[in-house]
């Protein structure tokens, strides 16, 4: 069975082939700190977490690692915006103006602006978080009023159990949403899409960041 180092290097090599400019976000939810430290030693700096309480302990345990970045990628609840704004470097799941406002108000002035991605529900799934593409403009305007926030782009998770052809179409729709975001925010630079099972397709459709967990770390405990 491949080691963590082998799995990580294989993905890095494939990303260099498919999309040399794209970045890897290692999704470390459910993984022990020891694996985060091992991956950090291999050169990985960006780690994604879904659950605030779990992430808070990991942030403490890894506070000695210079340059490590923490991305909050789970559903965003209003009662958690303060600790998230205080402890994370990125938030991938902003889909309402209220959440953007609360993050902007809670981000400490002693920290750099919080990097924000708008979560877009590209397949209009009722049970899934995410804004409709026509909400990109008002959300971008709200974020632009806060010096404590920086809009970096778009995040999306297409519908599960799609064929490869359908995934290509969904990722292409997210790329169109990203282009809309770029027109509104020239400094935007990130299209976060693609996970362990479909990140290659996402790269082919223009992803600049892919979120990969089990394909690197192995199954979660």
Image (cartoon, helix red, strand yellow):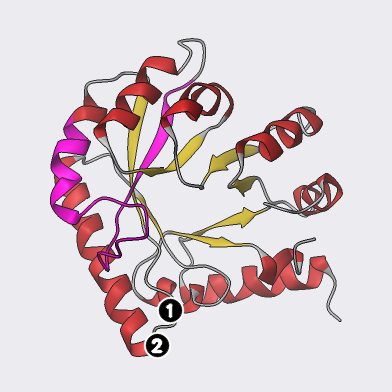
Q: In screen coordinates, is 35 left or right of 209?
A: right
211 part of magenta stretch: no
Mark 1 crowdedness (10 Å alpha carbons): few <14, some 14-19, many ≥20: many
Residue 183 is labelled as none
Q: Is residue 171 above or below residue 112?
A: below
Q: Position of residue 200 (x, y in %)?
A: 49, 77
Q: CA distance from mark 2 to mark 1?
A: 8 Å
Query: Residue at the top extreme?
Result: 109
Write the residue at 67% across / 35% down: 53
Q: If you read the primary sequence from the N terminus, does the residue marked by circle 2 or circle 1 appear first?
A: 2
Q: Quadrant of residue 125?
A: bottom left
Looking at the rendered structure, the secondary structure element under dot 1 is helix
Looking at the rendered structure, the secondary structure element under dot 2 is helix
Q: Position of residue 33 (x, y in %)?
A: 82, 45
Residues marked 2 and 1 touching at CB (< 8 Å): yes
Q: Nearer the viewer, residue 67 or 146?
A: 146
Of circles 2 and 1, which is in front? 2
Q: Nearer the viewer, residue 74 or 114?
A: 74
113 part of magenta stretch: yes
Q: Nearer the viewer, residue 113 or 92?
A: 92
Q: Quadrant of residue 12?
A: bottom right
Mark 2 crowdedness (10 Å alpha carbons): few <14, some 14-19, many ≥20: few
Write the residue at 47% across / 26% down: 79
Q: Is residue 146 above or below residue 206?
A: above
Write the residue at 26% across / 50% down: 131
Q: Is residue 157 above or below residue 30?
A: below
Q: Which residues are magenta?
A: 112-141
Q: Is residue 156 above or below residue 41?
A: below
Residue where numbered disc 2 is placed: 164
Q: Quadrant of residue 152?
A: top left
Q: Position of residue 176 (x, y in %)?
A: 20, 64
Residue where numbered disc 1 is placed: 201
């Amino acid at each position: 069975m491949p080691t963590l180092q082998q799995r990580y290097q294989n993905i890095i090599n494939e990303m260099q082939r498919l999309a040399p400019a794209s970045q890897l976000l290692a999704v470390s939810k459910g993984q022990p700190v020891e694996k985060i430290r091992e991956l950090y030693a291999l050169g990985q700096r960006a780690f994604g977490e879904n659950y605030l309480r779990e992430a808070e302990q990991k942030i403490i345990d890894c506070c000695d690692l210079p340059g490590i970045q923490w991305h909050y990628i789970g559903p965003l609840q209003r009662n958690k915006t303060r600790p998230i704004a205080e402890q994370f470097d990125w938030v991938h799941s902003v889909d309402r103006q209220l959440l953007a406002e609360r993050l902007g108000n809670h981000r400490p002035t002693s920290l750099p602006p919080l990097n924000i991605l708008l979560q877009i529900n590209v397949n209009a799934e009722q049970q899934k978080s995410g804004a409709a593409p026509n909400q990109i403009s008002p959300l971008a305007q709200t974020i632009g009023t806060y010096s404590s926030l920086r809009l970096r782009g778009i995040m999306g998770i297409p519908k599960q159990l799609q064929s490869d052809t359908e995934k290509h179409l969904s990722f292409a729709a997210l790329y169109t949403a990203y282009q809309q975001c770029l027109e509104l925010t020239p400094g935007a630079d990130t299209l976060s899409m693609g996970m362990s099972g479909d990140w290659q397709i996402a790269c082919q459709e223009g992803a600049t960041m892919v979120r990969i967990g089990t394909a690197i770390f192995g199954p979660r405990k």
